[in-house]
Amino acid sequence: MRIRARLSTALRMLAVAALAMVSFNFVAKRFMAENKQNMAGRGSIVVIGGGLAGMSAALEALHQARNTVVTLLEKEARLGGNSAKASSGINGAETRTQAAQGIEDSIKTFAQDTTASGRGRSSKILVDKLTQDSAQAVAWLQDLGVDLRILARLGGHSVARTHRLPEINGRAQSVGWSIVSTLSKHLDKMWSGGSGRLRIVTNAQATALLADAADKGVSGVEFLANGKVERVQANALVLATGGFAGAHAGFLDKYAPQVAALATTNGPFATGDGLQLGTALGADLVDMDQVQVHPTGFVRPSDVDNPTKFLAAEALRGAGGVLLNARGMRFVDELDTRDRVTAAITSNCSAPDTRAHHSSTGTQEGPDAAAFLVLTQEAADRFGHGALAFYERMGLISQAAGMEELAKALRVNEATLRQSVSEASMYFWGVVTPVTHYCMGGLRFDVKARVLQASGQPIRGLFAAGEVTGGLHGANRLAGNSLLECVVFGREAGRQASAFASLVEGSNL
């Protein structure tokens, strides 16, 4: 009897336990389903912006701690942003690529070039951070699988330190696209791996940062996705939303009206979202009137007035491309900094008889200032025929066999042309114009990627990286430093956000 009673009691206990387990599993599954949009929860990180800075921040945050959970929000249909359009390369001093090619460089020289380009307005501590971490940033990308073995010396640089990819079977590899696609694949692998540590939400427009009532720090974000408003709580948040040169109405008109009428290389998504989000939480802005005008955006002969231009890569001039006015005269050192080359084009290529244009268009059509960009066969060989072929397929570059044919194509005096361009069997040429390209101004931040208030105090839990920030580049960004800052400060933001989130999570235990 006692044995049967004990067995009966045990069976009842097992039944209760089984029922409890079933109930627990049901509740747990229901909780997970109901909170899928809030999977980040406490002790987590939200990254807003899926360009290179945002992806670098997300990858680094996930690498730093095994318990880190990241939600990456991107308002476009896919990751990449303006980073995917970058064409010249990423800078690095004292890199293993430079060492392999016998190129002597130093962090000090790189910092001097960056500071000189900024015309004295760059933050020294930010420049030091950028240049000191540059070799590590390039190596990080190489270790992830980006083949950055080609070097070029671009405008404003003392030596060749701008890294890009080689051609494959005669086809160019876009450095920006290659980098963001590589990082995107690493993120996709983590997302699909089932660890639950990463959630990527595209077509997600961040509408507001959530503030902690106790200390006025950040506590999450509100965003719109698939027609629904969602909220994600977080202990740390990284803003990596890019600049504002893609939309004339708004920050560009307000802070830099002197360039608002120019065409742009930016996508329409570059509208300064992060600036609005940050300032609503008390962030300070710096250098907002400093908007970089790139000297060479291609003028497509079939669409000369299109407000969005395809960038004529800095590497075209780095390889030996020269700029001529409509008279066939060279007027500038093509390897000078972007602001000076832009000023030279504006001064020398704006009059009716000096403004370059395609033969298929009238002299009054197209941009107010335009120049001819010409590469000899030798320069084309250095730049890479795969990339040139890409430009040709897009109708941006044309060929001319010999000096006489080039003079006819440009409609200039052949004798004058011979004084400006070296003799060659083949030439490659196009028409270029200054275009808004990059915003040096943005959220004030420090070397730890913390977003600062006007008082200089950081906003608790809020970090930023990339073009959304200001103070690093001063009055003029050095060519090749954009991708670099995205990696250097994106990774720094990820490290700092991870450390901060872990600290807050620990204090809540």
Image (cartoon, rainbow, N blue to C red):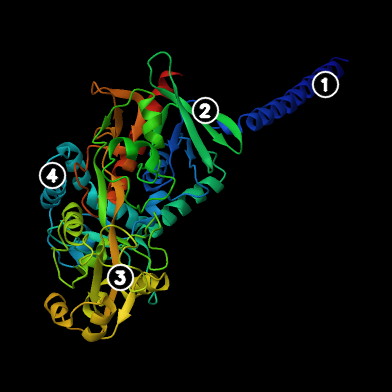
**Could you classify mark 4 by the number of other residues whose Cα lies within 10 Å: few (under 14), some (14-19), or many (20 or more)?**
few
Q: What percent of the width, then of the height, locates residue 82?
A: 39, 51
Tell me the residue that label 4 is attached to.
119
Q: What percent of the width, then of the height, locates residue 371?
A: 24, 65
Tell me the residue that label 1 is attached to.
7
Q: Secondary structure at mark 4?
A: loop
Between marks 2 and 1, how big is the CA–CA gap?
Answer: 44 Å
**Could you classify mark 3 by the number of other residues whose Cα lies within 10 Å: few (under 14), some (14-19), or many (20 or more)?**
many
Q: Secondary structure at mark 1?
A: helix
Q: Earlier in the sequence, mark 2 or mark 1?
A: 1
Report if the CB atoms under discs 4 and 3 are less than 8 Å apart: no
Tell me the residue that label 2 is attached to.
41
- Of labels 1 and 4, the one closer to you: 4
Relative vertical location of residue 370 with respect to residue 219 in this rendering, above or below: below
Report if the CB atoms under discs 2 and 1 are less than 8 Å apart: no
Question: In terms of depth relative to the viewer, which is nearer, 72 or 18?
Answer: 72
Between marks 3 and 1, how big is the CA–CA gap?
Answer: 91 Å
Amino acid residing under circle 2:
Gly
Amino acid residing under circle 3:
Gly
Q: Residue at x 19, y 52 (%)?
A: 339
- Of labels 2 and 1, the one closer to you: 2
Amino acid residing under circle 1:
Leu
Tell me the residue that label 3 is attached to.
430
Between marks 1 and 4, how big is the CA–CA gap?
Answer: 87 Å
* Residue 235 placement: quadrant: top left
